Image (cartoon, helix red, strand yellow):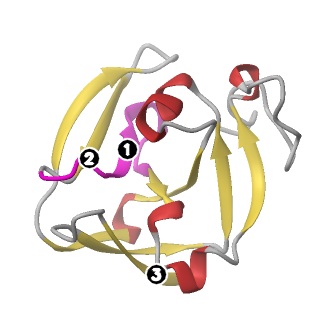
Amino acid sequence: MSSYTGKCHCGEVEWSAKVAQEHVLCHCNTCKLLSGGPYTLNQIIDKNDLQITKGTVKNYTYYGDSGKPVHCYYCPNCTTHVYHHQTVLGDKIIARTGLLDVTGSHNFKPAAEIYGKAKYKWEPEIAQTFETLPPNM
């Protein structure tokens, strides 16, 4: 794992995250609503592997497929979503790898696709696709 930096659209919030050099593509309906696209680029990491280095984030909560709370952390000015904490994952968070320093994250390879059940019919399979989450989660 290597450390990368990220920032929100307006630059008010910055962070560093230790991640593997890969993306997990999420096709769930929430990610589509947040991104305005067919999926988001993410990675599940330990909560301690992401540090906010500038500014502060706000949060709100919704309930995921598990029925458990999902806390979403975002820039209060431009609303860029930095990470999510699905309580069902314990001490893990979902970091937005697509927001990390482009010199690093643009070279990340897709490792898996989750929530394949919500993919648009025209999307090709890019990596191993799971209907929801992989069985080990």
In the image, residue 121 sits, relative to residue 55, either above or below, namely above
**Which quadrant does the N terminus fall into?**
bottom right
Q: Residues within 10 Å of mark 3 (few under 14, many from 20)?
A: many
Where is residue 56, by image quadrant? bottom left
Q: Residue at x 11, y 68 (%)?
A: 55
Where is residue 82, by image quadrant? bottom left
In the image, residue 121 sits, relative to residue 39, either above or below, namely above
Whole-number angstrom distance, CA of label 1 to CA of label 2: 6 Å
Q: Which residues are drawn in magenta?
A: 77-93
The amino acid at mark 1 is: His
Mark 1 touches mark 2? (CB < 8 Å): yes
The amino acid at mark 3 is: Tyr
Q: Which residue is mark 1?
A: 84
- Nearer to us in this view, 66 or 21: 21
Q: Which residue is mark 3?
A: 4
Q: Which residue is mark 2?
A: 73
